[in-house]
Amino acid sequence: MSGAGEGTERGIGIAAREKHPPIAKRGVIMPASPIRKLVPLANAAKRRGISIYHLNIGQPDILTPQEIVDAIKGYDDPVLRYGPADGISEFHDVLVEYFAGRGVNIRQEDLMITTGGSEAAIFAMLAVCDPGDEIVIPEPFYTNYAGFAVMSGINLVPVETRVEEGFHLPPPEEIESRVTSKTKAILICSPNNPTGTVYTREELERIARIAQASNLFVISDEVYREFVYDGKAHASMLHLEGMDEKTIIIDSISKRFSACGARIGYLLSRNREVMDTVLRFGQARLCPPTVEQRAAVAGYRAIDRFMSEMIAEWERRRDLIYEAVNKLPGAFCRKPEGAFYTVARLPVNDTEDFSRWLLEEFNVDGKTVMLAPAQGFYATKGKGKDEVRIAYVLQEEALADAMQILERAIEVYSGTVDVGERRASKG
């Protein structure tokens, strides 16, 4: 009896020396978002009375179409019930019609409605990879892919793309060199977040040939499908022959309908095993949001009313940002071909330090700029230290003012103005 008591006391003593149970390894290595990690500094600046131009996050300021707002306001079912795990039938129907208009014939059973495009990406990774498996991905890439990979126990294997080449894909042998026995998929995003690059059909065919030769899936993020400029057209992996069983499309209404808070996305594949797998994932989390699915249906039914005007607005903003960046002494970017981002090289050694400084120390007439340091969009350590992602999600007048402030900030930060001017800028 006393032995048991001693053991219990000894166990309690050991536990008492620990402040708390240890966090899982995935929690320790989970990366912070470069888009949101500086938010506490931005909040502190706002409390000091500083106005901030947010170029760090892809939150459009374009009004959500009224049809979507009306659908949410008009929801009148007396009970907000669970919906089907794969989404409501009405939403499936409208998506089948939408894709048919874009040269892709699908069936209802090829669709899985998800809680945002994020869940679609996580489901896709979980469906094709076991812990320790690998996904090849061009970098820089959407930073949350890295978080999803950590959550899933998957390793992202980067393929370098370069700002000088507009972040287009390298020769096929560079991509093929990253494929190993652990590789299960290639993940692409076109139009691209964070670079604004739109892959050509030849680039997609390059990826398709590698996938077919090595028996890999291609996970294709097509969230920005409509946002293609200069008269170019978007090409989908599902436009390519021989890719039906190997392609998984992930998508979302967030940017297309300026409805980021609705959290409605979907996964699309003609591969029956993939769809059966993600359906069971969906059953485990019950169902995607019901009211917002009704709103998405209204958005797709009205898409021809507002989409062309929205694209024209993004293209004007793109032109403004491209010209402004390349007027900055020592800065450089290629003209984005789609989405509403660019990754720009700035004449500073550490854009994270620069971005912190912008929020902590710098302002012009009580205004400053918030950027997303590009390091967090790379898997290769040390890459992107002199780059930032700029989201041109503000009206043109605000964008122009923000870029003038950024030009002044670079002058001050790099020491090309004297100390007295630097102090004046901080005031």
Image (cartoon, grey):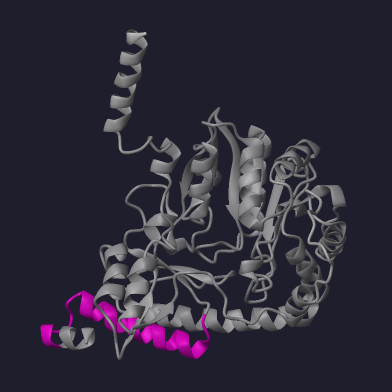
Q: Is residue 7 above or below residue 166?
A: above
Location of the C terminus (image quadrant): bottom left
Q: Is residue 212 above or below residue 202?
A: above
Picture residue at 69% right of the left edge, 45% below the top:
285
Q: How many marks?
A: 0
Instruction: Answer whether residue 155 is visible to the viewer in this image.
Output: yes
Q: Position of residue 52 (x, y in %)?
A: 39, 80
Picture residue at 34% right of the left edge, 79% below the top:
47
> Does 132 sit left or right of 213 as displayed?
left
Location of the N terminus (image quadrant): top left
Q: Position of residue 87 (x, y in %)?
A: 79, 54
Q: Which residues are magenta?
A: 394-420
Instruction: Answer whether residue 175 is visible to the viewer in this image.
Output: no
Picture residue at 78% right of the left edge, 82% below the top:
305
Is 282 colored magenta in this rendering?
Answer: no
> Does 417 sit left or right of 259 as displayed?
left
Residue 275, picture quadrant: top right
Q: Is residue 143 above or below residue 293?
A: above
> Does 389 sit left or right of 202 as displayed?
left
Residue 81, picture quadrant: bottom right
> Does 372 sit left or right of 283 as displayed?
left
Q: Nearer the viewer, residue 278 or 167?
A: 278
Is 412 colored magenta in this rendering?
Answer: yes
Q: Main secondary structure of the magenta part?
A: helix
Q: Position of residue 8 (x, y in %)?
A: 35, 19
Q: Position of residue 215 (x, y in %)?
A: 67, 33
Q: Nearer the viewer, residue 40 or 229?
A: 40
